[in-house]
Amino acid sequence: MKIVLITGSYPPDICGVADYTERLAEALEGAGAEVAVFTGKQWNLANAALLNREIGGIRADVLHMQYPATGYGWHLGPQILSLLRPIVMTIHECSQAHFLRRLSLYPFAVRAPQVIFTNQYEQEYCQRFAPWIKGRSTVIPIGSNVPPGPDTISRRPNAVTNFGLIRPQKGLEQMMEMARLFNERANGLRVRIVGTVLPGYEDYFARLRREADGLPVEWVTGLNGASLSSALAETEVAYLPYPDGTSERRSSLIAMLANKAAIITTRGPHTPPAMEAAVQFANSPLEAVTLAEGMFDNPDYLVARQLSAAEYAVKFSWDSIAAEHMAIYERLTARKR
């Protein structure tokens, strides 16, 4: 079976959907599919006919588009392509998107033989506005874009790690506040920030570095591949203060779960009830500091929290994700035959 994954961004582009698509392609190939990636295109409306011809020249059993991605921009080429051909759609973001972006999703609901969402909240949100997709939509969770590091790596003691893109609205101000509280309480703990500076936010990063001067903050930036996996595997405790709360679409959370880190995060409207047993919630950096101190002071409790994270992470394995996709593809190709 040949699958063509259509995406606006693909590594080395800095984009979560790009990383997801790369891992999905690898997992599908591991499951026995032949995979081609259709990317690096001009996605504007005027180019839609050319995109359609190029796609038509590929002998594929299934076309599968990932949307949105930074490479698409605000162009409408993907929407027109989805109206011209039956394309399986994965909608990575809807409820938190700009109003115009949400409107632009309607064409994808017209002809898609299957619409995939990455969590139940997004599925239910979209079905309220496009109820006709209910019979052809499903939820497949995302996996970690970063392969887990080896269990043999020693964990960094007395460090609370944050992981993600370095830009505003990623909870980094809360990490700075945590570092200030660590300093005031002289508890011997430190903040460790593992991430990549998003292009255009170099000044923001420089300001954070100035704010962190004299505080117990360690910066680990620009890593990828095995070095990034190793850095995450060193994590004892992670603090992920998402402004709108955690959910199963947070790839940074899933990466930390996969590396068996004890996680402190924020609850939000998208947080599923099942996550309650796997993570701890803090409404402020002060609450997070108290939780972190409690775990470092009680090693048995820390290990228990890490095991809870590992148990919850099983559902996000790429083998499972690939199997769910393959079941959809096989059903659709059987229907065409």
Image (cartoon, rainbow, N blue to C red):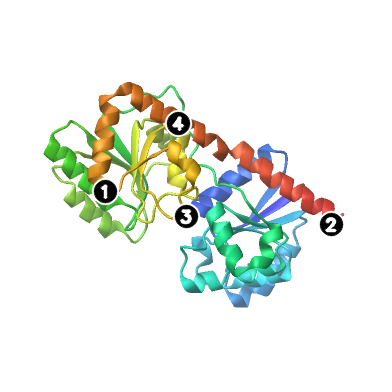
Q: Residue at x 26, y 50 (%)?
A: 174
The numbered disc on residue 139 is: none
The location of residue 122, given as percent across then percent down, is: 54, 58
Tell me which label, 1 or 4, sits earlier in the chain: 1
**Residue designated by label 4:** 308
Between the residue at mark 1 and the residue at mark 2, the CA separation in whole angstroms equals 53 Å
- Residue nearer the viewer, 312 or 79: 312
The reply to whether dot 1 and dot 2 touch (C-beta < 8 Å) is no
Hey, what amino acid is under mark 4? Ser
What label sits on residue 15 in the rendered view? 3
Residue 218 visible in the snapshot = no
Task: Give the amino acid type for the residue marked by disc 1 in the picture.
Answer: Ser
**Distance (Cα) linking label 1 and label 3:** 28 Å
Q: CA distance from mark 4 to mark 2?
A: 43 Å
Q: Position of residue 229 (x, y in %)?
A: 44, 35
First-in-chain label (3 vs 2) = 3
Of circles 4 and 2, the one toward us is 4
